[in-house]
Image: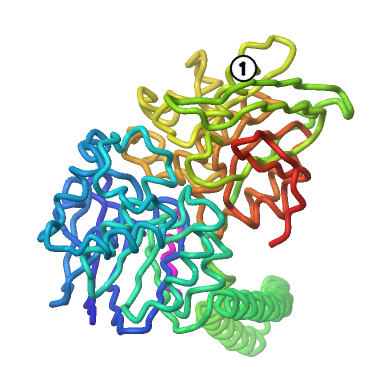
Amino acid sequence: MLQIKHLTITHKKDLRPLLCDFSLTLSPGDRAVIIGEEGNGKSTLLKLIYDPALAEDYAEWSGEIVTRDRLGMLFQELPLPCREQTVWEFFSEIPDFYDIPPRELTETARSLGLPGDICYSDQIIGTLSGGEKVKLQLCRVLLQKPDILLLDEPSNDIDIDTLRWLEEFILSCPLPVLYVSHDETLIERTANMVIHLELVRRKTLPRWTAVRLPYREYMARRADSLACQEQQARKEQSEFEQQQARYLQIRQKVEHQQNAISRQDPHGGRLLKKKMHAVQSMGRRFEREKENLTQLPDVEEAIMLRFPESTAFPRGKRLLDFSLPVLETGRVLARNISLTVTGPEKLCIIGRNGAGKTTLLRKIAQELLPRTDIKAAYMPQDYEELLRDAGTPVEFLCKTGDREEISKVRTFLGSVKYTPEEMSHPVHEMSGGQKAKLLFLKMILDGCSVLILDEPTRNFSPLSNPVIREVLRAFEGVILSVSHDRKYISEVCDRVLELKEEGLREVEWEE
């Protein structure tokens, strides 16, 4: 069992509170998902539970985390030293690795869709696909036989078949599972407990909710509760304003009578003075009642700008005729690839991990980005390709650096919930979701009509993802993407192609 008592977390850089007086008990059979907007401390909470040293560079905390069980942690990103290891070196760090029966190694690897002998591979981890890296981490965690599972974005980059396996694994797991995920389908199908972390009042006030409810039921109840609160607040505000109007009329009438009364009528003056005291007492009572009125809901809303109309791509105009005899990265991945794209199509490439989807999308980007007749943007799976030397968010988005441009950029950043302090933070310190927002903002500011997106929704929260999908669905340009996000594929994409060894083939998407 895991117990957390009165945990408070503060960001060291700007002394911003992330979590306040948080308490939780996690028991066998609990499948608890942590949700919240980008940068709210979800990954930080998991790191503190697993090993406080992982967050000590940027976070301070107080409270108590109690467990005597063995924790297994799957990280959102593999540390750089791990990426430079061979697969065998990565697994050999498991305590008592050589005492694990070969059959168990084989069965665990194959259950994840990995080769049975993967644990002994000499392949460098950094050369694997994003999904293969996640599977390797999960395989190593399971081989250590943990008592409690902590999973930070276990659904990132894994293919659809493995996503379904992961759902079944979480559902059947007898251990307590605490996880962060942006995959709404996974959350809807697996979570029986929701931990919602919020930062309200312009990210100055942390608030948390922990309920033993499935995700859909929690969101429905929350929406109903907020709607009722808003209705009650508006009703009380309307009644209060009517009272205020009557009060002001009475006060003005008494003041007029006082100004008009003759000094030869002292008795009438005394009566009016008493009347004014009564009116003032009524005003003070109304002010006290105002403090007790139901407040409008103070919630953390997901906000994302929309692409301007100028980014529309002409309907029926051919954008791309792409052909590739062989797709390879040291080994042949696929042959005879052919792809034609016309505006304003939104297509998604799916396929198993390691099939070469990212490699193919990168080759398409290399063909489209240099063209001068279109404005194209590429959002890679690894954001560091574009953000490694980004500086601050303002520096990354500014081209000229003049005062007017800086003001415009800061306004745009504020619209997607960047605080003034975060606008001056180094980009490399930010969460994956905040970096993703930054890349989307750049595409919008640059007026791109062609978007080449590798896992575009992978780092947005379940609360932001519906907004992102709506933005992309309303986009009137062309989208060429790779994704395993089932809601994104269903709601945004009008063409789905599967990459196999024999090439690309169009498929009917059903989920």
Please, what is the dominant secondary structure of the magenta stretch? strand
Q: Quadrant of residue 125?
A: top left
Instruction: Report x, y in % for residue 232.
Output: 66, 81
Residue at x 78%, y 28% (from the top left corner) = 341
Q: Look at the numbered disc 1 and give the secondary structure of its residue.
A: loop
Question: Horizontal placement of 309 versus 234: left or right?
Answer: right
Q: Residues within 10 Å of mark 1 (few under 14, many from 20)?
A: some
- Callout 1 amino acid: Leu
What x and y, as percent, mark residue 31?
41, 76
In the rendered image of this protein, does residue 165 appear above or below residue 64? above
Quarter of the figure that contains the C terminus: bottom right
Q: Which residues are magenta?
A: 194-202
How was the colour assigned to the protein in this rendering?
Answer: rainbow
Q: Nearer the viewer, residue 309 or 71?
A: 71
Position above or below: 436 against 17: above
- Asked if residue 195 is among those painted magenta in the image, a careful observer would answer yes
Depth check, front residue: 176 or 100: 100
Q: Is residue 262 visible?
A: no
Work out which residue is located at the far front of the displayed protein and give it: 103
| Residue at x 67%, y 87% (from the top left corner) | 268
* Residue placed under numbered mark 1 in the picture: 369
In magenta segment, residue 289: no
| Quarter occupied by the N terminus | bottom left
Closer-to-camera residue (483/448): 483
Pinpoint residue 269: horizontal percent, then vertical percent: 63, 83
Q: Left or right: 492 with respect to 367?
A: right
In the displayed orientation, state which residue is furthest to the right: 316
Q: Is residue 350 left or right of residue 252?
A: left
